[in-house]
Amino acid sequence: MQANVGDTLLVHGRIVGQHDKTAEVVEVLGQKGSPPYRVRFDDGHEALLSPGPDTVVRHHEKT
């Protein structure tokens, strides 16, 4: 998985009834865009995340 600052990670819920979560990548701690990432979730809290196979990267479009 490769991500850059500004990209969004979509973490799919793992069980029935669990909602998907989105988080913005605020810092890439791995080499060349690799995990782990410091992310900010929609509710404002930040965490260190090493995404699993249930996560999709939505790349930020540069303008």
Image (cartoon, rainbow, N blue to C red):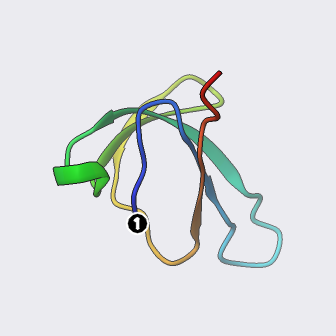
Percent across and percent down for residue 29 are 20, 43
Pointer 1: what residue?
1
Query: Residue 32, relative to residue 12: is it above or below?
Result: above
Crowding at label 1, few (<14), some or many (≥20) Cα neighbours within 10 Å?
few
Seen as rendered, the residue at the extreme right is 17
Quarter of the figure with the C terminus = top right
Residue at the location (49% across, 27% down)? 45
Q: As drawn, is 39 to the left or to the right of 17?
A: left
| Front residue of this view, candidates 56 and 40 | 56
What amino acid is labelled 1 in the image?
A: Met
Q: As drawn, is 21 to the left or to the right of 38?
A: right
Percent across and percent down for residue 2 are 39, 58
Query: Residue 52, relative to residue 56: is it above or below?
Result: below
Mark count: 1
Query: Residue 12, relative to residue 38: is it above or below?
Result: below
Residue at the location (60% across, 36% down)? 60
Quarter of the figure with the N terminus = bottom left
Seen as rendered, the residue at the extreme front is 63
Residue at the location (67% across, 50% down)? 21
